[in-house]
Image: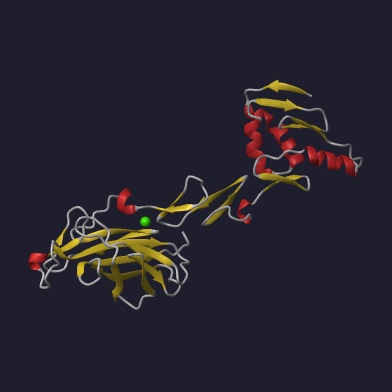
Amino acid sequence: MYLEQSSAAFNALPEVSHHSTFWEPSSLNSVILDRWRSIRVICPKRQHFYEGLLFVEPAPGRETSSALHQRRQSVRCPTGYHFLNGKCIDINECEMENRCQHECTNLPGSYRCTCPDGYRLSDNKRTCEDINECKELEIRCGPDKMCFNRRGDFKCVDVTCPKDYERDPETGHCRLPCSKSKVPCPPGSKYADVIEYHAVSLPAGIPAYQDLIRLIAYNQYGVAMPKTMFSIIENDRSVPFSIHTKEGRGIVFTLTPLKEKEQYKIKVHAKSYDRRRRNVQYKTTFIIFISVSLFPY
Ligand SMILES: [Ca+2]
């Protein structure tokens, strides 16, 4: 066997064909062509040179089973192929578990994961992550609207303040000044009620009795109010949520499994009492948009 430099790549084609016959994987032709583009290897009869290994083809009818086994042991296929019945066969990675979180496409010697619309492939090239259109596309929904980044898409939702309420420019909350309230404010309070808007985007597959959101009521100085009672006061439809209070926090949980590709809106009222639990000091209303993805991610 000897090596011969060759600048004319396709001069090697007859040898490539010869080797292809030995290997028999027609899909490998391009790999072999690339590999052989700069160096042409000419082997003696019944000898083959591939990936640094010399293969000796036995004389017809003389290959023993141990020789065949030895030859198979010495065969190296390119990445993404395995040796079977004398051939390098493409591995279908998509038949293996957990290769791709969403969809898998098998390619010669490789595979590719793809994600649904509204998602992108993560850095690990396997899982999908939601595109935050509100941030990345800098969506401006307009006055009294909020961009709700949902898993798979986004939506502009209405966050209009009720009559007599004013919007906090920093937080976006709606506040009812005591001067405009029909109900007397507790001593020292500036606002009779505060409405906070929240949005929660969930994957599909949320079961019943799953804690979802933890709510904390703050006073006008930003101090958490430990003596607070929470209750769901309004739903836009018959929704499977309830709330329990734990250590001054309101915890929204599911009563039944959540439907895929569904959006809910719930309203939670929080009454914060003074230390003796006699008088309501602050009131907060939480309006919560809950979106469930079509997919479990
Ligand atoms: Ca999104």
Residue 251 figure quarter = bottom left
* Residue toward you, 12 or 213: 213
The quadrant of the rendered image in which ligand 1 is seen is: bottom left
Q: Quick one: 196 or 132, which is closer to the camera? A: 196
Q: Is 280 on the left or on the right of 11, as rendered? A: left
Q: Which image quarter is the N terminus in?
A: top right
Indicate whether 262 appears above or below 40: below
Q: Residue at x 42, y 63 (%)?
A: 293
On the image, the x and y values in percent for residue 171 come to 22, 55
Look at 25% across and 66% down and name the residue there. 275
As rendered, which of 170 and 87 lies closer to the eye? 170
In depth, the one of 52 and 196 nearer the eye is: 196
Q: How is the image coloured?
A: secondary structure
Query: Residue 203, image x and y in percent?
Result: 44, 62
Q: Is residue 280 visible?
A: yes
Which residue is painted at 62% across and 51% down in the image?
93
Count of number-bearing discs: 0
Q: Quadrant of residue 46?
A: top right
Describe residue 28's horizontal placement relative to residue 127 as left or right: right
- Whether residue 159 is visible to the viewer of this picture, yes or no, is no
- Extreme bottom residue here? 238
Name the outermost residue toward the front: 276
Task: Residue 227: give x, y in percent of width and height.
Answer: 28, 66
